[in-house]
Amino acid sequence: RDVTGVQTCALPISLVEHWSLSPLARQATVNTLHGTVSHAEFVPGTTAFVTSGSDGRLVKWTGDTSQELHGFGQAIDTFGIAGDGSIMVATQDGALWCLDGDHAIALRPRGSRVVQMRALPHGSTFVIGYADGAIEMLESRSGRRALVARSSETIRDIAVARDGESLAIAAGDGTVRLARRRSDWFLAAWTSL
Protein backbone atom coordinates (compact mmCIF):
# COMPACT_ATOMS: atom_id res chain seq x y z
CA ARG A 1 0.00 0.00 0.00
CA ASP A 2 1.36 3.43 -0.91
CA VAL A 3 1.61 5.92 1.90
CA THR A 4 1.27 9.50 0.76
CA GLY A 5 0.37 11.26 3.99
CA VAL A 6 0.56 11.12 7.72
CA GLN A 7 -1.36 12.58 10.64
CA THR A 8 0.04 13.90 13.88
CA CYS A 9 -1.97 14.54 17.01
CA ALA A 10 -1.07 17.56 19.08
CA LEU A 11 -1.80 16.32 22.60
CA PRO A 12 -3.42 17.22 24.97
CA ILE A 13 -5.32 19.57 22.71
CA SER A 14 -7.71 18.44 20.02
CA LEU A 15 -5.76 19.31 16.87
CA VAL A 16 -4.81 16.84 14.14
CA GLU A 17 -2.36 17.83 11.43
CA HIS A 18 -2.38 16.19 7.99
CA TRP A 19 1.03 16.13 6.28
CA SER A 20 2.09 15.07 2.80
CA LEU A 21 5.31 13.08 2.58
CA SER A 22 6.54 14.25 -0.81
CA PRO A 23 7.25 17.04 -0.49
CA LEU A 24 7.08 17.10 3.33
CA ALA A 25 4.49 19.78 4.01
CA ARG A 26 1.54 20.35 6.31
CA GLN A 27 -1.64 20.10 4.25
CA ALA A 28 -4.25 20.91 6.90
CA THR A 29 -4.90 21.32 10.60
CA VAL A 30 -8.24 20.10 11.97
CA ASN A 31 -9.68 21.02 15.36
CA THR A 32 -11.54 17.83 16.28
CA LEU A 33 -13.09 19.29 19.47
CA HIS A 34 -12.37 15.94 21.19
CA GLY A 35 -10.65 17.52 24.18
CA THR A 36 -7.76 15.07 23.88
CA VAL A 37 -7.29 13.05 20.68
CA SER A 38 -6.64 9.39 21.55
CA HIS A 39 -6.17 8.03 18.01
CA ALA A 40 -6.28 9.03 14.34
CA GLU A 41 -6.26 6.62 11.40
CA PHE A 42 -6.75 6.84 7.64
CA VAL A 43 -9.69 5.00 6.10
CA PRO A 44 -8.01 2.35 3.89
CA GLY A 45 -7.74 3.38 0.25
CA THR A 46 -8.91 6.98 0.82
CA THR A 47 -7.67 10.34 2.08
CA ALA A 48 -10.45 10.42 4.69
CA PHE A 49 -9.48 9.74 8.30
CA VAL A 50 -11.19 8.93 11.59
CA THR A 51 -10.41 10.39 15.03
CA SER A 52 -11.39 9.49 18.59
CA GLY A 53 -10.95 11.20 21.89
CA SER A 54 -11.67 11.79 25.52
CA ASP A 55 -15.15 13.06 24.65
CA GLY A 56 -16.20 9.54 23.54
CA ARG A 57 -16.90 10.50 19.93
CA LEU A 58 -15.67 8.67 16.84
CA VAL A 59 -15.56 11.14 13.92
CA LYS A 60 -14.80 10.64 10.21
CA TRP A 61 -13.16 13.55 8.37
CA THR A 62 -13.34 14.03 4.60
CA GLY A 63 -11.66 17.29 3.69
CA ASP A 64 -13.24 19.92 5.95
CA THR A 65 -16.40 17.88 6.50
CA SER A 66 -16.92 15.88 9.69
CA GLN A 67 -19.38 13.06 10.32
CA GLU A 68 -19.88 11.68 13.82
CA LEU A 69 -19.91 7.90 13.46
CA HIS A 70 -20.87 7.19 17.06
CA GLY A 71 -20.81 8.64 20.57
CA PHE A 72 -19.89 6.19 23.34
CA GLY A 73 -20.59 8.27 26.44
CA GLN A 74 -17.07 7.62 27.77
CA ALA A 75 -13.52 8.14 26.57
CA ILE A 76 -12.25 6.05 23.67
CA ASP A 77 -8.79 4.54 24.22
CA THR A 78 -8.22 3.43 20.63
CA PHE A 79 -9.87 2.02 17.51
CA GLY A 80 -8.93 0.22 14.32
CA ILE A 81 -10.23 0.08 10.76
CA ALA A 82 -9.93 -3.30 9.05
CA GLY A 83 -9.32 -3.89 5.35
CA ASP A 84 -13.04 -4.50 4.79
CA GLY A 85 -13.89 -1.13 6.41
CA SER A 86 -15.20 -2.54 9.69
CA ILE A 87 -14.33 -0.44 12.74
CA MET A 88 -13.58 -1.79 16.21
CA VAL A 89 -13.47 0.57 19.20
CA ALA A 90 -12.01 0.12 22.69
CA THR A 91 -13.51 2.33 25.38
CA GLN A 92 -11.81 3.40 28.59
CA ASP A 93 -13.52 0.66 30.62
CA GLY A 94 -11.91 -2.08 28.46
CA ALA A 95 -15.07 -2.88 26.49
CA LEU A 96 -14.80 -3.65 22.76
CA TRP A 97 -17.37 -2.48 20.23
CA CYS A 98 -17.93 -3.02 16.52
CA LEU A 99 -19.67 -0.31 14.52
CA ASP A 100 -22.49 -1.49 12.28
CA GLY A 101 -23.66 1.64 10.50
CA ASP A 102 -24.43 4.09 13.31
CA HIS A 103 -25.01 1.31 15.88
CA ALA A 104 -22.34 -0.04 18.23
CA ILE A 105 -22.45 -3.78 18.94
CA ALA A 106 -20.77 -4.94 22.17
CA LEU A 107 -18.15 -7.61 21.47
CA ARG A 108 -16.58 -7.71 24.92
CA PRO A 109 -17.79 -6.33 28.26
CA ARG A 110 -15.58 -4.08 30.33
CA GLY A 111 -12.40 -5.61 31.67
CA SER A 112 -8.67 -5.19 31.27
CA ARG A 113 -7.94 -2.10 29.16
CA VAL A 114 -6.95 -2.40 25.53
CA VAL A 115 -3.44 -0.95 25.13
CA GLN A 116 -2.74 -1.97 21.51
CA MET A 117 -4.99 -2.75 18.57
CA ARG A 118 -4.07 -3.48 14.96
CA ALA A 119 -6.41 -4.30 12.12
CA LEU A 120 -5.17 -6.85 9.63
CA PRO A 121 -5.30 -5.57 6.04
CA HIS A 122 -7.52 -8.35 4.66
CA GLY A 123 -10.98 -9.06 6.04
CA SER A 124 -12.25 -8.02 9.47
CA THR A 125 -9.67 -9.52 11.86
CA PHE A 126 -8.03 -7.49 14.64
CA VAL A 127 -5.12 -8.30 16.95
CA ILE A 128 -5.68 -6.86 20.41
CA GLY A 129 -3.20 -6.47 23.27
CA TYR A 130 -4.41 -5.91 26.82
CA ALA A 131 -2.92 -4.29 29.90
CA ASP A 132 -3.02 -7.69 31.67
CA GLY A 133 -0.77 -9.27 28.98
CA ALA A 134 -3.48 -11.10 27.02
CA ILE A 135 -3.25 -11.22 23.22
CA GLU A 136 -6.48 -11.87 21.36
CA MET A 137 -7.55 -12.31 17.74
CA LEU A 138 -11.07 -11.08 17.03
CA GLU A 139 -13.16 -10.96 13.84
CA SER A 140 -15.45 -7.98 14.11
CA ARG A 141 -18.06 -9.20 11.60
CA SER A 142 -18.59 -12.70 13.05
CA GLY A 143 -17.55 -12.07 16.66
CA ARG A 144 -15.17 -15.03 16.43
CA ARG A 145 -12.38 -14.63 18.97
CA ALA A 146 -9.46 -16.52 20.45
CA LEU A 147 -6.95 -15.85 23.19
CA VAL A 148 -3.73 -16.69 21.35
CA ALA A 149 -1.11 -15.97 24.01
CA ARG A 150 -0.53 -14.33 27.36
CA SER A 151 2.46 -12.41 28.70
CA SER A 152 3.23 -11.69 32.32
CA GLU A 153 3.12 -7.93 31.65
CA THR A 154 1.24 -5.47 29.45
CA ILE A 155 1.44 -5.63 25.65
CA ARG A 156 3.68 -2.79 24.43
CA ASP A 157 3.38 -2.99 20.64
CA ILE A 158 1.91 -4.97 17.77
CA ALA A 159 3.45 -4.86 14.29
CA VAL A 160 1.74 -6.21 11.17
CA ALA A 161 3.86 -6.99 8.09
CA ARG A 162 2.98 -4.94 5.03
CA ASP A 163 1.53 -8.02 3.28
CA GLY A 164 -0.56 -8.85 6.35
CA GLU A 165 0.90 -12.35 6.58
CA SER A 166 3.09 -11.96 9.71
CA LEU A 167 2.78 -10.41 13.17
CA ALA A 168 5.23 -9.40 15.90
CA ILE A 169 3.98 -8.63 19.40
CA ALA A 170 6.20 -7.12 22.13
CA ALA A 171 5.35 -7.31 25.82
CA GLY A 172 6.60 -5.43 28.86
CA ASP A 173 8.29 -8.59 30.18
CA GLY A 174 10.77 -8.46 27.28
CA THR A 175 9.19 -11.24 25.23
CA VAL A 176 8.47 -10.92 21.54
CA ARG A 177 6.00 -13.29 19.90
CA LEU A 178 6.02 -13.91 16.17
CA ALA A 179 3.28 -15.50 14.07
CA ARG A 180 2.74 -16.28 10.41
CA ARG A 181 -0.76 -16.74 9.05
CA ARG A 182 -1.73 -20.16 7.85
CA SER A 183 -5.05 -20.64 6.07
CA ASP A 184 -6.60 -18.68 8.94
CA TRP A 185 -5.13 -16.34 11.58
CA PHE A 186 -6.88 -18.38 14.26
CA LEU A 187 -4.65 -21.36 13.27
CA ALA A 188 -1.38 -19.40 13.28
CA ALA A 189 1.64 -20.92 14.98
CA TRP A 190 3.27 -18.60 17.54
CA THR A 191 6.97 -18.49 18.40
CA SER A 192 8.36 -16.71 21.48
CA LEU A 193 11.76 -15.04 21.38
Image (cartoon, rainbow, N blue to C red):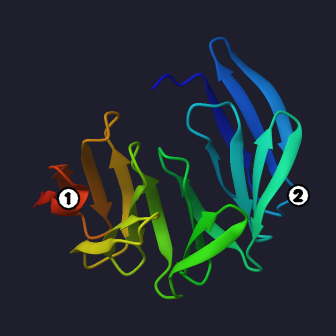
Answer few, some or many: residues within 10 Å of disc 2's Cα (few below 14, many 20 plus, some between 14 and 19).
some
**What's the residue type where badge 1 is placed?**
Arg
Q: Quadrant of residue 184?
A: bottom left
Residue at image point 42% right, 77% down: 131
| 156 sits to left or right of 61 | left
According to the image, label 2 marks what residue?
33
Helix, strand or loop at label 2? It is: loop
According to the image, label 1 marks what residue?
177
> 137 or 177, which is in the foreground?
137
Helix, strand or loop at label 1? It is: strand
Task: Give above or below for 82 relative to 113.
Answer: above
Give residue 81's position: percent from left, percent from top: 54, 51
Give residue 53's position: percent from left, percent from top: 74, 63
Figure label count:
2
Mark with earlier residue (1, 2): 2
Distance from Cα at disc 1 to Cα at disc 2: 38 Å
Looking at the figure, which quarter contains the N terminus?
Answer: top left
Residue at image point 49% right, 22% down: 2
Task: Give above or below for 95 relative to 183.
Answer: below
**What's the residue type where badge 2 is placed?**
Leu
Give residue 180's position: percent from left, percent from top: 17, 48
